[in-house]
Each structure stands twice: as structure tokens, then as C-alpha cells.
Amino acid sequence: MEWETVIGLEIHAQLSTKSKIFSGSSTAYGAEPNTQANVVDLAMPGVLPVLNKDAVRKAVMFGMAIEADIPDVSVFARKNYFYPDLPQGYQISQFDQPIVGLGHLDIELENGETKRVGVTRAHLEQDAGKSLHEDFAGQTGIDLNRSGTPLLEIVSEPEMSNAKEAVAYMKKIHTLVQFLGICDGNMQEGSFRCDANVSVRPKGQVEFGTRAELKNINSFKFVERAINIEVERQIDIIEAGGTIVQETRLFDPDKDETRSMRSKEEANDYRYFPDPDLLPVAISQALRDSVRAELPELPEQKKQRFMDKFELSAFDASILTSNRALSDYFESLADATGEPKLSANWVNGELASHLNKAEIDVTDSTVSVEQLSALIGRITDNTISGKIAKDVFEAMWAGEGDVDQIIESKGLKQITDSGAIESLIDEIIAANPGQYEQYRSGKDKLFGFFVGQVMKVSKGKANPAEVNRLLKAKLDA
Amino acid sequence: MHNKSLTELAADLRAGTYTSVELTQHFLDRIEQYDESLNSFITVTPALALAAAAKADVQIADGTAGPLTGIPMAHKDIFCTDGIKTSCASKMLDNFIAPYDATVVEKLKQAGMPILGKTNMDEFAMGSSNENSFYGPVKNPWDTTRVPGGSSGGSAAAVAARLAPIATGTDTGGSIRQPASLTGITGIKPTYGRVSRFGMIAYASSLDQGGVFARDAADCALILSAMSGFDEKDSTSSEVASEDYVAALDKPLQGLRIGIPAQYFDEGLEADVAASIKSALEQYKALGAELVDIKLPNTKLAIPSYYVIAPAECSANLSRLDGVRYGHRCDDPVDLEDMYKRSRAEGFGSEVKRRIMVGTYALSAGYYDAYYLKAQKLRRMIKDDFVAAFADVDVIMGPVSPTTAFKIGEKSDDPVSMYLQDIYTLAVNLAGLPAMSIPVEAAAGLPVGLQIIGNYFDEARLLNVAHQFQQATDFHKQTPQGFGA
């Protein structure tokens, strides 16, 4: 039988506000346990939550970016359950009146087509703390630094039909929230994480199959693997005559398997009700206007603009707009050099590979826009060749100085003087009489041999175009 | 000096008739001498009170004192006090010392008022008799075999017996007005949002409101001016500016329109209580007011509505009391679930458990619409009744409680009969209105309170209406026997 997969994602994006969603504590990552938890985060008796307006702005901005319905009023609700890292005994979240309603997002498929995926809703909520099971023998430690950190939970429609689409959607959201400056997107630190609802059904069937919710997926690679493993598991069960149980499953990347956490029967009744400590949130026209005014150019728009303005290919433009900082870096470079195509090649080539190797972000690049711009300038004014430029880049990356300094100190300046090149050519011809004769007798392929020899003796500094032109003239004379 | 008003005490302090240290010591001595029979305090803090009094004396001497500087007071043990145990009368919080002051506590500290101690109450403010306390019941100073009402019974008894000039309370369904009524003192529950709830341990967040007990309305006005106002730490606190409640006290009542709801004089009201209330209303007529018959048709719905909403909210509010970070934790838990279950089973009393269970049930999947949502609809109808009534009248009057103080133990096995104690007070909390209880003519030697309900943020008028009555009568000056001259 042929099977069809249905996937919906719930993404938790930590909003990059300075303080927590309902308290004034800092949200900075990595502090000593419980040093960023005040009496509100600890849920001491009598304390009250006060909504962080910046979290509201950031959620509204997200809603605008996905062209979502943003209701006039949204309501915070208590989601009740007991857990030691949930100090209140309930999570303040949103239930039937989320801050962001139905919106959508376009993803690119592997075959080059575009698919529109619906975003059901996005709502604000507070994160829980962390339970530390390793550090205390026989006991569990609780760190409430993360308790109360603002999260935007982004829920998709069940509209993705394979793991690759799910990854494309997740990446798209990941890029978008960073572009908007509402989330740092750091997946290692848990700022961006995802649960996947996965089900299968016979191809052509209208009703959904029973779904499993996969928890704790914190990388793009794991999302793809977890979904594929889960789809296989479900199909195996059904084909063996079994039925799928609605349950929450945990993806274990070490064992490459998903395993049951709890079934629907064991699921909590969260007893949601409106939080009486918080007034309904009104989204005024003034707020909408001011957020819209701050809304940056979105990745889609920027990609199109790069294609129009800089005549870049869709491929190049797409890579350059995968990240806001990278797109800013590129645009500054293209404007400074007036050489957009060359700039794109350098950013997507040498710069990207050095950044990847060093595992750092473009904002931490050791080669600045000014330095790379100067380098490109030396290529276009023929001071150095593109090949030599890579060596200069390497030296700049290593912190050996600016472009001209490096060219000077390493003697890398290109030989463009035709007299000098001609004398090099004469030397090479004189040293290789056999090859010269063969060429003259019609073995055209040997032209490449002579070019290589000239470049070799010039240590790569001879201007390749000049070498070509002069060599041709000499050999064919 | 314990029978003097706040204004008189402040004048004496300024005149140097006695110092704040002497005044504070006087009340501490009275607590020492008389509270054994009343059990109105859970914690008494002599050292802290005297230190604050000494500081107040310096301010009085150097002329930086305010109108309340140096006058000692007591807080209901539901308000968190930095460095002093805040138990909410529960075993659960018997070991809890907050590292912060409630906004109300902070404001009255800033006003220069030494804290004598923390008063007894029904556990987590759940009760109408002050019998639900881990620290034992509070007794009514008028008859120590009787209850003082609840949940703020300790504050009411302490002020009635003049063990403190004033004391704070909270009112979720009548917890200031009913004990004020049963102990013959004046109490005010302001409009919801008028007084910050920050640091006031939550029972039912949408209904809880802090207020005060005093000898009379003029004292209430003075305290309320100091403790009310917007608080950025409480999102539900109102930005409507507080008024100068003292300045409004002296307005004559000529032409005042008083609404009399027929529903507050039904068969459940004891005859002698009804007689006292009617006699007080006659007094108002004599002061120039006009009595207008009004209808609050949905009054009876207040009890079912309240007893869904309040338990629902409390079931979540009390979840933080889980034995993990503070409060009672059971011995030797075998696992997490065991720790939760035993800590909470041991820490909470039976009325608290009953309300947590009712509330959890009302919010459960499949019951939410039938209970919680329905109760919210009733709440809206009750509020609409009041809004319609206030289109035609300035204040509404009726009894606070259907009875006078009952015997300790009389209703403690019958929760429903206990819940009926609050039949005339609950609707006010559901609507969020301000209301007072002032003493009127006693019935068979036991105090009776008249309830005055005001429109939203109309505390100034409420206090004015109460004060004018007290100018013409001396019920508020009556004191129980056995607590010194």
C-alpha cells in the first residue's frame, strides 16, 4: 500500500526580550543556577505577574510578518499541572484567545516549487525552569533561571507531507524570527525548539491517521531523522495489522529511535482558565502602527530585491538572505565594491567556508566588510589575481593585517607589465624547445602547458589574461 | 488611650502627651493581657514594633511626621511582611518568612505605623467564622463562646477589643464586612483594584480585595487614603486616582438616595437583625436621606456563582504550595508524587482541601462550560443588577449578615449553612463594588452591622455616608466588657 504522511509542527521561539515575560529578572543565558529568579519567578506567595510589553510587540511583529490575523484582544490563561520546575503549579499561556491568529508562510520544495503552509496560531507563554537530575545523588536540582522566559509557540497547520518539507518550514521560521530580531535562534541554548505531530494514512484517504507528538527535537537534522523514523515505525505497525496509539514520544538522537513518554489516557487535563491576575491584552491601532513601522524587510522581499537590484541568481540570493546579518554583510559589501556578483561569490565562497570552519557567526567574522571590500578592489584593479586573493584572504583571516600590507609584505602584487611577462614567456619557450615544436606542428593542447609554466615561474603573480594574450601571440607568431 | 480615634492619637503624639513608644507599649501590654482569651494574633512582634515606634518618635520630634506616624497597627496574616512569619493561618506556611513586604504593608510602614503583629484568620481566607485556623479559633470579644466571623476574624476581634487601633483585612466574599458586623466595628472593602494585591496571598484573585477595620469611618478614611492607589506590581490595580477620603467626610446627607433591595430582607434574615437594620435606615431618613425600593433580582445566584469561581481560582492559586521551594514538606518522601500528596494532605486543613477539590472539578475537561463558564455568566448578571440599580440611587443598604455572632462549633459541620452567612456580601465581590459594615443597634447584646454598598470607586461617598451616621449615633463607641476601661 502507498502511504501518505501528515506533519504539523509546534515551534517554541524564545523571544529576545531583556527581562522575563512576567517579571523584571534578566533572561541572559548561562548564569549560575537560580541567580536570575526573583520572587515572582520563584512563585512566592502573594506575588503577581506583570506583562512585559516588549514580548507583546515581538509577538505582534511575528504576526504581521506571516500576514496573520491579530485579534483586538487576547487573553492569558493558566495551564495547570504540577512539576518541580514549574513554580506556580501552572504555566501562564494562552488558550482560546491567542495573540496571533491564522497566517501563512511559503516554503521552497526541492523541485523548485513553492508551497504555502498555514500557521494556525502563535501564542505567548512563559517557559519553565530546568530540572537537573545529574548533579545531586538521589535528588533533583531545580534551576529557575529560565522560569518565566518569554516563548512564542508557533503552531502550523498539518500541511507538511514529508520530513524535508517540515525542515524547510522550520528553517523558514528560524530565518524569519532572526530577521525580525525577535529571537536569537540559538538551538544549542534551546532558544528555538520544536515538537512534531506526525501521522500516516493510506494515499488518498481524507481522514487523518492517529498522530504521535514527537518532543524535544532541537536541530534541523534531528527533525528530519525523528520524523522519518516515526513514519517508518507507524507504517510498520499498521502493515503488521496493529493500530497507532495517540501518544507523546521522545526522540532519542543517540539511539536513533522515538519512544513513548505518555499515552492520551495518561495525558494531563490542564484545566485551562483565564488568568485572573492579568487583564486581557488589547492590541490597539497605535501599537499596530508602531510595530509595523519597525517591521524590517522580510527575507522573501530581500531576496527578490537582491535578484532585481544586484542581478543575483535565485540560488545566490537565497543563501545570502538565509540570515539577516549575512544579508547585511553582503549588501554593505556589494554597495562598497560596486561588484555585486563578485561580492556574492566571496561571501558565499571563502567567507562562508571560513565561518563554517570556525563555527562562528558573520557578526564575529575576523574579516570586516571594509577589508573584504578592499580585497575585491585589488582584484578589479588588477593588482592581484583572484587566485592570489584567496591567499590574501587567508592572511587577513589570520589577522596578518590589511590587504595592501599583506600584498606588499608577501610580494604578491600582480605582474601586468607586458614587457616583464614577455620576457618570462621567452624564457619558458627557450627552456622547452620540444614542446614548442610539437605545438607549432599542430598540438594545440599544449597551450595550457605553457600557461601553467608561466604562472609557475611568476609564482602566480602574472596577470592571467595578459599571459594568455601574449603567449598566444608569441606561440602563433 | 486605646479608645481614642486615630486623629486623637495623632494629636496626642504631636502634643507630646505620650510618645509612640509609650503608645505602642500600651497596645503590646493589652495584647499580652487579653489576647489569651481571644487568640486574635498569630504572631506578636514587640521588638520590631518598639523599634519602629522609636523611629516614629524621632520623626514626630523633627517635624517630618505624617498623619499616621507613630500609631501602631496590626496586619492580617495574609499580607506578606519582610522578616516576619506570614502563615495565612495554615500549617502549610507555618515556617514561611517572606523576603518582601506586600504593597499595603510597605505603604503603611512608610506612613510610619509600627506593626504590633499578625492577626489570626481562617486558613487562606476560607471561612466565615475563623474556626478554620491552624492556630485555633478566634473568639468574639462580645461573647467568647461565639465566633468573631471570618475570614479576617483576628483583625476584627483585635480592633473590637482595642488591642490595636486599626488592622488590615481582606474581603473575598465578605471577610471584612461580616467580622466587622459580628464584632461591632467599622470595616471597609474598597472597589476591586483600589488597593494593591501584591504580597497579599491570593485566595480568589478576581475577588480578593484588601481593606481595613477601625473604630469608625473617619479612621477608615485616614487609613484607606494611605493604603490605596495604583501599583505597577499589580496589573489588576486601578489607575483611577485615589481621593482624599477624609475631606469628603463632612458632606451632609440631604437628598441622598438609598436603595433598599427587597432581596436583602428575605425569610433568611433573623427578625432582631432586621429590626436593627430598619431602625438604622430610619436614622438615615432623619438625616435627610431618601429610601428607594430597588430590586437586585439575581442576589440568590451569588452563592452558586461564588462557590464555583472562588474555588476554581483557589485551586490554581494554591498549587504553588507544593513543598518544593518553601512551606511544609512531608518527612521522607519516597518519590515526587508522594511528596506532593503528603505535603499537601498534611499542610492544608479540610475547608481548604474541600475548595481545592471543588475548584479542580469545576475546571475539569467536560465540566468547564457547565460550571466555570456558567458561573461567569451569573456573575455578569449580578453585576448588571447593580449597575442598573446605581443608575437610580447613590448607595445601597441592607444587612451584612443574616444573623448575629453564632456559637463556636455551631455551624462547623455544615458547610452549606456556613456559606449562607455570606448571602448578602458575596454579590458585592462578584461585582467588584466597594462596601462597608458599620455598627448599628445591637440585638440581644450582640453587635449588628449595616452594609453600605457604593458605586465603583465611590469610597469617598461610602465613608461620608457612614461618618454622618456615626456623628449622629454612638453604636461605634460601644466596647465589649472585660478588656479594661
Image (cartoon, rainbow, N blue to C red):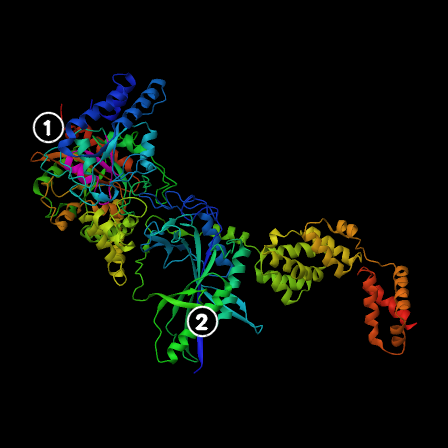
Residues A333 and B349: in front is B349
Q: Characterize the local packing of mark 2: few (<14), some (14-19) or many (20 or more) Cα atoms within 10 angstroms.
A: some
| Residue in the picture at 51% in, 55% down | A186
* Picture coordinates of residue A447, whole percent (x, y): 84, 72
* Picture coordinates of residue B97, whole percent (x, y): 30, 38
Q: Is residue A277 above or below residue A462?
A: above
Q: Nearer the viewer, mark 2 or mark 1?
A: 2
Asked whether A384 falls inside the magenta stretch, the response is no
* Picture coordinates of residue A400, whole percent (x, y): 71, 49
User: Cα distance, mark 2 to mark 1?
Assistant: 82 Å
Report helix, strand or loop for mark 2: helix
Report helix, strand or loop for mark 1: loop
> From the image, which quarter does the C terminus of chain B lie in?
top left
User: What is the span of residues highlighted in magenta in the rendered image?
Assistant: B166-189
| Residue in the picture at 47% in, 67% down | A118
Q: Quadrant of residue B68?
A: top left
Q: Is residue B254 visible?
A: no
What residue sits right under mark 2 in the picture? A229
Label 2 chain ID? A
**Amino acid type of the residue that numbered disc 2 sits on in the rendered structure:** Ile
Q: Is residue B376 above or below residue B484?
A: below
Whether callout 2 and callout 1 share a subunit is answered no
What residue sits right under mark 1 in the picture? B481
* Picture coordinates of residue B37, whole percent (x, y): 13, 32
Q: Quadrant of residue A200?
A: bottom left
Q: Is residue A341 above or below residue A126?
A: below
| Residue in the picture at 51% in, 70% down | A164
Q: Is residue B99 left or right of residue A399?
A: left
Q: What is the residue that sits farthest to the right in this orientation?
A: A477
